[in-house]
Amino acid sequence: MSGLWFNASWRGKALCLLLLLVFALAPVIADRYLLSVLILVFYFSYLGHAWNLLMGFAGQLSLGHALYLGLGAYTAAALWTLFGIGPWLGVFVAIPVATAAGLFIGWLGWRFAIEGVYFALLTIAFAEFTRIGFDHLQITGAAGGLFLPVNGQAANEWWNLGGGPLLYYYLSLTLAAAGTLLVARLRQSPLGYRWLAVREDPQAAQAVGINVFRARMMAMLVSAGMTAVGGVFYGFYYRNLFPSQVFDIGHSIELILAPIIGGLGTVFGPIVGAIILTPLGEGLTGLMQSLGLNAPGAKAIFYGVTLMTIISLQPNGVWPWLARHLRLDRPPE
Amino acid sequence: MPIDKHRFSRRGVLAGGAAAGAFFIAAPSIIRAQTRVLKAAVLLPQSGYLAQAGQSCHRGAMVSASALAELGHTVELMHLDIESNPDVARTQAERVINDGAHCIVGAFDSASTLAIAQVCEQRQIPLIVNIGAAPQLTEQGYKFLVRNFPTGGMLVANGLKQIHALIDATKIAPKTAVFLHANDNFGMAQRQGMDKAFPNSGLPFKLLESIPYDPKAQDLSVEVTKIRGLNPDLLLVVTRAADAIKLVRDIVRQKFQPMGIISPGAPGLYDEEFYKALGPLADYHIDAIPWANPKSKVTQTLEAVFKKEQPNFRFAVECFNVGFTFDALLVAADAFKRAGTGTGPELMKALKATNLADHAMIGPPIKFDEKGQNVDIPSSCVQNRAQTPTVVLPADIATMTPVLPEPPWQGRT
């Protein structure tokens, strides 16, 4: 981390601190609508970080990350509703559950050399049959859903993640900031360098003594664990969980858009991607509303066009281009 | 130019700033309280996987402003797409409340409705649920929510009553039935309702088996083969539009001929796609669901406006979604008129005191219990006749008499 900080230009450091300050003070001037948009920005930034570790750093495409999100959400929510175990403790159960699932998928894939697009299919398959399994799991309400209390004392205790938008705002901001720090730290660590080596050329990495299987499993472990924490946040923020929503492949796709647009394999890419996508989508809705236009699906088309434009103009994402143009990288000495 | 210090004292500026700040903070609620026109936001899934039904409801909302005007209510509607996504539903709820909405109507899907309900609860703005069957909507203790739509359990129980009436009216004697249902939120809620209601329904046939299926499955041939093996007299189904088409196609392909295909309260059998895809094979299936009352003056007004403003769509096919969406807005307009204000708590108080006799859907006056649920929403039997859903029971509102057993597949042209 210290390496990343000291390698950054003064502009980069100033921008980082300014953004953190602006976001920390945003609730003073922002209304509830803006806060709800910012919560989504931080939430998708955080999940983008988690996915980016596996894809951007270790080079393994997962299209089923909703699995770990759902397992995290369901585990913490079920522990609270069934046994009265709060989310701060529940998260320590949710993480092992999701990482166990992730490690099993990783083991199955990499042990038997299922790589690339076949590994992506494997992740989709696991997310799908987990969804079907939860559709029939009566203890968590099956397809009818699992519901957390929304009224009464228990629903308003901050230590049980109950409360208004301010609590969730700062919680999501903390998650996004902590996720960024963790990813930055890992990126600069020996493990991070091993991931990059494995991503670029697994055979060459193996030849120089890197245990490719172990490096990928470590990426899966951290990625699934981080996503599970995001799932706990999701479960308590929405306070209702339906397998068809939580484990849906659409959810998996949604959470990978920010890092792809922001910049795969970069520390700040997921943040930039989330800052671009969520507010722009909302801005488009506002614009259409003010013009009196009702065009369902326009946002999805806009997302698609944005994605194609960015991929064709900036194949590495927005962040590397932005960092270069704002001279946020430290110039070589 | 020198500044006149007597005109711009520090205290004066601070006091002025505080007053201006207080005004801007309080402005939305002051405007809400003073308004004479109900400003209702209609949040529906107009895109995403629920787009078909959401757009049908949206057409209902579009024609509601004119229909309500003819009934003496002035409303201003804000239409927003929630994209079949609870994340979007939540942010759009915050948006419309910021924009001055007195109440929200929506949102067809239970997950999105629950996301909106949390925002409404925190901001004390009433939410009137047009369609949403999850029992938890009115069981979780929301104080700013009312629902003029039956729960999954109510739908099934009322549907079974109608099947009883249907058997009496057609004099058929089914001995066995199979219950086939989608395993999504709605289908599983219906299954739970069926498990609870069927043993006490007094129906004269035995339920051989309940078979769940994945509505995303490419075909239902395995399920139909299983049903064919059981050879029930009646097939009770809970479907969505696309899988209802697949189901009937597989039934015809496997030459299985039950006395009737009856839904105890679900979409699918009366959608336009169903008629277009199956033609005469879509006829004679029966849906036991709440329906627009063809003999109500309110429904007739709504139908006339719908025909004028939505000429490309059939009211007879869309009246379930259109009728419930219209009734939700009618309930809001009626409460607003009685409350005389748009402030949330007063409007909610008026909503809870609703006693609305004239409305579009069949049934007694709309009233809400202490949980905000209208517990008295009866079902009717709607049979497909000449590819048009037609009310065949109860007799007092029926426009045709029911036909069962269904004519054989082979003779249909």
Image (tube, grey):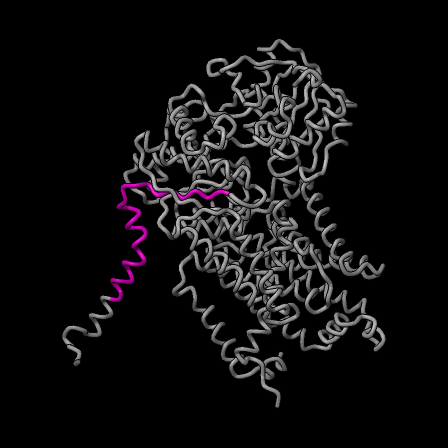
Q: Is residue B144 shown to the viewer in this render?
A: no
User: x%, y% of residue A116?
Assistant: 77, 60
* Up-down relation of residue B142 to residue A2 (above or below): above
* Up-down relation of residue A244 to residue A50 (above or below): above
- Which SS type dominates the magenta stretch? helix
Q: In the displayed orientation, state which residue is furthest to the top.
A: B171
Q: In the displayed orientation, state which residue is furthest to the bottom.
A: A333
User: x%, y% of residue B34?
Assistant: 26, 46
**Residue B165 or A61: which is nearer the viewer?**
A61
Please state the extent of the stretch shown in magenta in the rendering: B17-45
* Up-down relation of residue A22 to residue A104 (above or below): below
For residue A216, side relative to residue A330 (left or right): right
Using the rendered view, name the quadrant where residue A61 is placed: bottom right
Using the rendered view, name the quadrant where residue B410 is placed: top right
User: x%, y% of residue B187?
Assistant: 62, 34
B31 part of magenta stretch: yes
User: x%, y% of residue B286?
Assistant: 59, 21
Looking at the rendering, in which quadrant would you find the C terminus of chain A?
A: bottom right
For residue B134, side relative to residue B24 (left or right): right
Going 38% across and 64% down the picture, which residue do you hit? A29
For residue B287, side relative to residue B146 (left or right): right
* Up-down relation of residue B272 to residue B398 (above or below): below
**Residue B301 or A123: which is nearer the viewer?**
B301
Q: Is residue A193 shown to the viewer in this render?
A: yes
B254 part of magenta stretch: no
Q: How many marks?
A: 0
Going 82% across and 74% down the picture, which residue do you hit? A204
